Amino acid sequence: MKIVILSESVVKDNKTPVPSFYSKADSTLLKGGKPFFIPDFVQQCGISIHLVARISRLGKGFSVRHAYRYVDAWTLGATFTALDMLSADGLVPSCAVDFDGSTMIGDFIMKEDIDLVESKCQFLLGDDNRDGISLNGVDNMIYDSVSRLSWFFTWKQGDLLFSAPLSTKKSVKVNEHISCKVNNQLLLDFNIK
């Protein structure tokens, strides 16, 4: 299974042949509301919230107009970054983002059961409450990226594509609670340990 995360630069520039992204090992994935444990080697840990597309079929080299056929469900996901391991020039070493347990996904909603154009997210990130973030256009960014990336590698059923961050928090602390909803439907709910 591939876990692909789009970077913030995808939002700013969608004209490059390859969207800016990084990938993670499947050992980073947590599901089912399991708690996230801040690793001992991390001094400051940040969180980003993403819209996540689940790939539903095998595909390579397809156009953007067919990309919707390759996504069958959506959820919200979280990625964690060891902020203290970032380099001074802003480069992100793999060890800062690709450690075990550093990727979380929530419950999936089938694509036909949600209209993302009309949808809004609500996030409770510890003491930071963000309400009413629109998902309008995020699905188009994902479909565009699914298509463009398909020219470089083969998508397989069960692969996950995370949007560029919808929301970020500079640091999370032990005993914080994270919950994320779409249209008041709870998709992601877990504790920081």
Image (cartoon, rainbow, N blue to C red):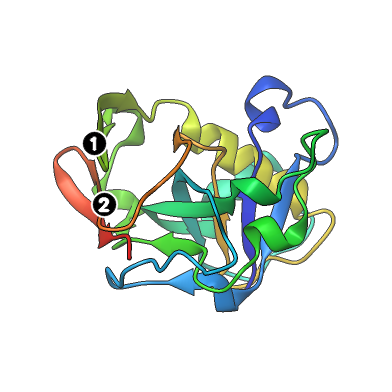
The residue wearing badge 1 is: 127
The residue wearing badge 2 is: 176
Q: Considering depth in this image, is 45 or 148 the residue closer to the camera? A: 45
Q: Quadrant of the C terminus?
A: bottom left
Q: Is residue 84 left or right of residue 122?
A: right
Q: Earlier in the sequence, mark 2 or mark 1?
A: 1
| Relative height, residue 26 to residue 10 (above, below) | below
Q: Residue flagged by tag 1: what amino acid is it? A: Asp
Q: Considering depth in this image, is 139 or 32 the residue closer to the camera? A: 32
**What is the distance, in whole Å, between disc 2 and disc 1 at their CAs?**
8 Å
Q: Is residue 163 left or right of residue 21?
A: left
Classify mark 2: residues with Cα within 10 Å, few (<14), some (14-19) or many (20+): some
Q: Is residue 116 left or right of residue 175?
A: right
Quadrant assignment, res 188: bottom left
Q: Residue at x 64, y 69 (%)?
A: 2
Q: Quadrant of the N terminus?
A: bottom right
Residue 23 placed where, x, y %? 69, 60
Q: Secondary structure at mark 1?
A: loop
Q: Is residue 69 left or right of residue 93?
A: left
Mark sitting on residue 77: none
Q: Residue flagged by tag 2: what amino acid is it? A: Glu
Q: Residue at x 30, y 73 (%)?
A: 34
> Do callouts 2 and 1 mark residues in contact (Cβ within 8 Å)?
yes
Residue 131 placed where, x, y %? 23, 26
Residue 100 placed where, x, y %? 56, 74
Q: Residue at x 85, y 36 (%)?
A: 17
